[in-house]
Structures are given as C-alpha cells and as structure tokens.
Amino acid sequence: MNKVKIITDSCSDLSGELLEKYNIDYCKMAIVEDGAESPAILTWSREDAHALYDKIRAGKRITTTQVPVEEFTTVFTKYLDEGYDVVYIGCSSKQSGSVNTGALVAKKLSASYPERKIFCIDSLNASLGIGLLAIEAAKLAMADMGAEEINGRICDIRKNVNQFVTVHTLDHLKKAGRVSATSAFFGNLIGVKPIIISDVNGVQTPIKKVKGRQTSFKEAVALLRDTMEGGEGQTVYIAHADCSDEEVAALTDLVKAEIPGADICTCIIGPIIGASVGPDAVGVWSLGKPVTHCCE
C-alpha cells in the first residue's frame, strides 16, 4: 500500500505550525491587488496579515483567483513522483471551482501514474472547516490508512463540520458573491451581527441576527456547543481576520467556559477567505452533529 499525502488549498486557513505538525501541503490560490497577482500564502506573519487587512479596511479592493492548473499539476506530481497517493481536500464547490479543476488535473495525471491513486474531495466547507478535515485526514494517514479509505472517511464526516462565523458587515461577502443582497441588507442594520454557517450543500448562509459584537460571540459559541456531544478531548477551532488580542482572548474564554475540556486551536483567517469575509470576522468550528440546514 502506498503512503498518502494530504493536500489542501489556500482556503483552509491552516497555520504554518499546523501544516508542519500534520505534514500537510497546500495548493496556492492568488490574491489580486491593483491588477497584480501574488500567491496566497498561509505561512504569513501576524504583521503581514495586519497589513493586508488594513488595506481592506481603508477601502482597497482585493480579489482572488482559484488554484491554477499549473499549481495543481506541480504539487500533485511532486508527491506522485515520491511514491505517494494523494488526497486533496478543497474548498466547497459552491464557493470555488478549485476542487473541480483539481479533479480534472487528477484524471489527466492518473493516466501517467496508473499505480497511484488521487482523490479530490469537495469539503462542503471553507476556512478551518476545510482545515480540520485536512487534519483528520492527516491523522489517518499517519496511522497508515490507505488513500481510498481516507477518502471515504472524510466524505463521511464532512457534513459533521459545524461552523459559526460572525462579521462586522456582510458587504465583503456580498461583493464576493457569497451571500445575497437581501442578506447583506439585513446584516447591515445598525449594531446587528449575522451568524453565518456552511449549510448542508456547502453554501455560506446567515441563519441568525443578533444585536452587538459580544452577543454575536456568545451566540456563535452557544450554537457550536449545542452541536457537540461534550467537549472533553474534542477540538474547537477559532479563526479570526486580524481581530484584536482582546477580542480573541474573550472568545477563547467563552469557549473554555461553555465547552469545558475542549482543546482550542486558533488561527488567522488567510488572504483568500479574508478577502471575502473582511477584517474582524471571527468564527468557531468543530466536528459535531450533522449539518441539516439548507438555504436552497
């Protein structure tokens, strides 16, 4: 049985530490600023993240690209040449076409590597919803599970990923085509903060509106708690788009209080997701009950 390499993309928001710890690689998308493209790096510093988010705060329009064919080909080929089977876990196909592009590249490469297996999984998620699935897959690979079985396990649990994100404004998501204009309007009522999930089909959709920033934190954590069966030994992932240290600490304290015994892992939202959600977005993720909400 071949060894397995877990690969994700720039939407996974995994930190450099997590990528290294779990031996995960990623295919890079790109951000576009004033017509110039640059790779969407996840191993960026807090200072680099702050600089990008400050540009967005100042009104700079940052757009993004999907993973190009050449990037998939380079990354997949590297590990196929080293004797690995590949499991790629990509952003929800409702939010990016990258997973479909990856599948096309995989099909082409399979003809040249008939002894290897390449699986491309639509995570039905974004940000650390993808990241946590990649970590779960990496744990299975470290336990010497084969690529086909890892593919099946991740497909089985991808609808058990629960996300609750809150943003200062839905304007950025609206501009990126991630929510409807109606949702954006209601999200911008003075002081009202939306709670956004990734629904059963992988669509980002607001499900609740609450009054006030701190209340939105409490609601997000309470909703996550209610999807989990206890917290002992489970991991809660927190990601934020350049929030203050005070806000991150406050959210962390809420998780500790509401979900006792849970491990907490905190990351900065990367440049691709960040360009869509905007500065100061923050969210919590974990595995739990199956997601059943459908916005369609």
Image (cartoon, grey):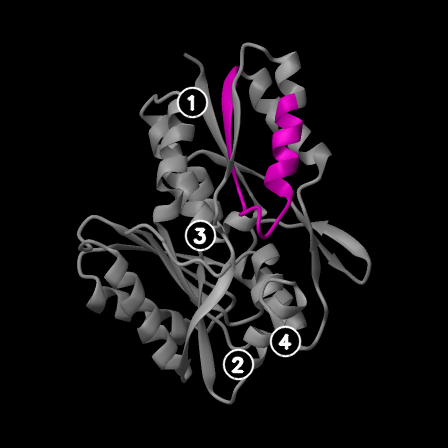
Q: Is residue 154 above or below residue 219?
A: above
Residue hosting label 1 = 148
Mark 3 or mark 4: which is in front?
A: 3
Instruction: State the SS at label 3.
Output: helix
**Residue pictured at 63% horizontal, 42% vertical:** 98
Query: Percent from the top left, x then y, of residue 210?
Result: 39, 81
Residue hosting label 3 = 128
Mark 2 or mark 4: which is in front?
A: 2
Amino acid bearing label 4: Arg
* Structural distance between the alpha carbons of marks 3 and 4: 23 Å
Q: Is residue 172 above or below residue 9?
A: below
Amino acid bearing label 1: Glu
* Structural distance between the alpha carbons of marks 2 and 4: 21 Å
Residue hosting label 4 = 57
* Structural distance between the alpha carbons of marks 4 and 1: 44 Å
**Residue pictured at 61% horizontal, 31% vertical:** 103
* Structural distance between the alpha carbons of marks 2 and 1: 44 Å
Instruction: State the SS at label 2.
Output: helix
Query: Which mark sits nearer the N-terminus, 2 or 3?
Result: 3
Residue 186, label in figure:
2
Contact (CB < 8 A) between labels 2 and 4?
no
105 is within the stretch colored magenta: yes
**Residue pictured at 54% horizontal, 46% vertical:** 91
* Structural distance between the alpha carbons of marks 2 and 3: 26 Å
Mark 2 or mark 1: which is in front?
A: 2
Asked whether, in this view, residue 86 is left or right of residue 67, the answer is left
Mark 1, other Cα within 10 Å: few <14 / some 14–19 / many ≥20: some
Instruction: State the SS at label 1.
Output: helix
